[in-house]
Amino acid sequence: EARWMKLVREKKPGKISADLRKIMNMGEGKLPPWCMKMKSLGMPPGYPTLKIAGLNCGIELIKGDMYGTLSSGKDSKDKIKY
Amino acid sequence: MNAAVNNPETTIYVGNIDPRVTKSQIYELFVQVSPISEIRYPKDKVLQMHQGYAFVECCTPEDAQYVIKLMNNTVSLYDRVLKVRRANAQSTNISNP
């Protein structure tokens, strides 16, 4: 489905649109509510390279709609490899 | 619509969703914490409204377990707290370890 492919291309971990922030009640420059829980549960097993501001990298990563990033561009898509 | 569960090991149930929430928003939210392979978000055929729940499919059982622990009672959309549980196959009731 074309719409699904578009979603997969556009929506990435570490970035939350203004649209979704609004209904979550989460302003720009804020960490999403699940990040606190990551301190006890650990980082997502599906994203071994995920960096989140203030958790496993510097707070300066918080910028506009960003609060984290997948450090390597292409390889960490949907495939799990060990 | 029959919202059958493909694989109960990798599928999570998300409940208490405000009907204004779109499928894109559910994807955007859950892709933050796990790769997502599929979302089923049934609509009432007559009312043309979402029914308040969705099935989100992760890639591995490990991802699904993690998402349930991390996201249950964690996020509110339109001031409604999302409930996240493991999706049980219709008739078989798999007990949690």
Image: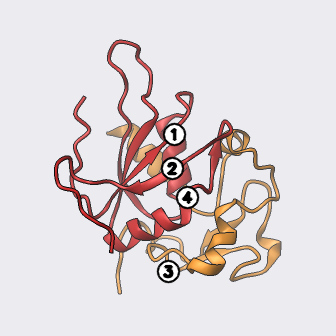
Chain colours: A orange, B red
Percent coordinates x, y for residue B36 in the rendering: 40, 57
Quarter placement of the N terminus of chain A:
top left
Instruction: Find residue B11 and report its image quarter.
Output: bottom left
Q: How crowded is mark 4: few (under 14 residues within 10 Å), some or many (20 or more)?
A: many
Quickly name the residue at label 1.
Answer: B16
Q: Name the residue under label 4.
A: A12
What is the chain identity of the residue bearing mark 4? A
Between disc 3 and disc 4, whose residue precedes? 4
Question: Residue shown at 54%/79% (left/top)?
Answer: A49
**Label 3 neighbour load within 10 Å: few <14, some 14-19, many 20+:** some
Residue A57 in the image: above or below residue B77: below
Gap in Å between the C-alphas at discs 2 and 4? Answer: 22 Å
Specify the amino acid type for callout 1.
Asn
Percent x, y for residue A56? 68, 83
Q: Name the residue under label 3.
A: A48
Q: State if disc 4 and disc 2 touch (CB < 8 Å).
A: no
How many C-alpha atoms fall within 10 Å of the one at disc 2: few (<14), some, or many (≥20)?
Answer: some
Look at the numbered discs 2 and 1 and tell me whether their residues touch, using CB distance below 8 Å.
Answer: yes
Q: Do the residues labelled 2 and 3 touch (CB within 8 Å)?
A: no
Residue drawn at x 78%, y 80% is A58
> Distance from label 2 to label 3 (Cα)?
26 Å
- Is residue A22 depicted above or below A69 in this figure? above
Does dot 2 land on a helix, a strand or a loop? strand
Which chain does the residue under circle 3 lie in? A
Classify mark 3: helix, strand or loop. Answer: loop
Spatial CA distance of label 1 from label 3 is: 30 Å
Amino acid type of the residue that numbered disc 3 sits on in the rendered structure? Pro
Query: What is the spatial separation of the Cα atoms under label 3 and label 4, in whole angstroms?
Result: 14 Å
Quarter of the image for residue A39 reads bottom right
Residue type beneath disc 4: Lys
Q: Name the residue under label 2.
A: B83
